[in-house]
Each structure stands twice: as C-alpha cells, then as structure tokens.
Image: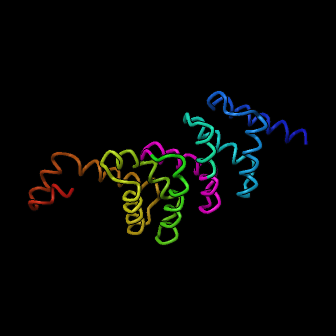
Amino acid sequence: INETLVKTEDAVIALQRVLPSGSGSNSEISGKLYKIAQEYGQTFENVQQIAQNFARTGMSWADTIKATEAAVLALNVAELDATQASDGMIAILTQFGIKATDLTLVVDKLNISADNAAVTTEKLLAALQRTGSAAANANLSLDETISLITALSEATGRSGENLGTALNSLIQYSSKSSALDTFAGLSDNVAQVV
C-alpha cells in the first residue's frame, strides 16, 4: 500500500509541476485520475501519463481532464498505448485547432473510419501527425484529411507514417506555382479546383 501511495504522490507532483498554478490539491488531482482509470478500466499509470502529456502543452486542468478522457477512450476502442493516444490527440489539437472538449468526437470519427475501411486508428493517428500541419495550411478540414488518408490506406495498405508522408508530399506539390501552371494547362478549371 505504501508503494502505491508513494507512486501516486510522485505522479501527482510531476503533473502539478506542468499544470497551471491553482489547478487543485494533490488529493483532488489523484482522485480525478483514479476515477477516470476506474471508469474506463485503465491503469492509473496510463491515465496519469496521458494527463501529464496533455498538461505539458499548457492546457488548463479542466481541458487536461477532458483530453485525458478522450485519449483513454481511444486506448479502449483503438488498441493504442498511452503515448500513441496522447501524442496523436495532441497533434490533432494543435494542427487543426480543435478544442479538448471536442476530442471525443474526433475519437468517434477515427473509430468509425477504422471500423468501415481498410485503415486502423493507429495508422490514422500516425498519418495525421505527419501531415496535419500541411493539410491545415491547405485549408483541408480534419474530416477531409481523414478521408484522404483512409483512401490512400485502402489503395496502398502502407503504414501510417508512409501515408502521412505521401499526403504531405501531394499537398506540397499541388500548391507549387509550377504544379498549378501544369494543372491550368489541362483545362480551364483544374487549377482552381486544385
């Protein structure tokens, strides 16, 4: 029991170091993390690791908890580990400007795509981490980017990293002026469509 208490206290102290001041007492923080772990059938270690990863991004305690719940949900439905879940969600948050309160909806989108197509949630997250910034800069929504990654996955069966790199290259190439000139030569509307 003492070992568990010491580990819990150490984890909460490490989390408080990266949370904004006034985020709550040690018992409040540990109580909330244990509650999430219990509700989702996860270990305290996974939950506190995910929470700490989100807190390091500068999130408030309330947003950290919302994001942690979504990432723990992703752990359960997508067979990810704690690092994959939190890193993937952090990438989506920052690259597409999504709020922590909307991450559960994102997990649903990823899960639905994985259930209905030849792609896994792990592949989608890995690809999004590679191409999210380029896609957002090209004014592609998260839904459009997920769709493109899913189509590439079904066509090629490649890894998430390869899919993200390929989509990133396509976006970069199609936005070059020389590429737009080439597209414009194909027909009057092609350059504008691209």
Horizontally, residue 2 falls left or right of residue 111, namely right
Q: Is residue 150 magenta?
A: no
In the rendered image, residue 128, in percent from the top left (x then y), is placed at 44, 52
In the rendered image, residue 152, in percent from the top left (x then y), is placed at 38, 63
Q: Is residue 88 magenta?
A: yes
Quadrant (top left, top right, bottom left, bottom right) of the C terminus: bottom left
In the rendered image, residue 112, in percent from the top left (x then y), is placed at 50, 67
Q: Main secondary structure of the magenta part?
A: helix
Residue at 41% x, 48% y is 132
Residue at 54% x, 49% y is 101
Front-most of 40 and 22? 22
Q: Quadrant of residue 33?
A: top right
Q: Which residues are magenta?
A: 70-97
Query: In the orientation shown, which residue stands out farthest toward the bottom?
Result: 116
Residue at 52% x, 70% y is 115
In the rendered image, residue 1, in percent from the top left (x then y), is placed at 91, 43
Q: Quadrant of residue 53?
A: top right
Horizontally, residue 80 falls left or right of residue 180, namely right
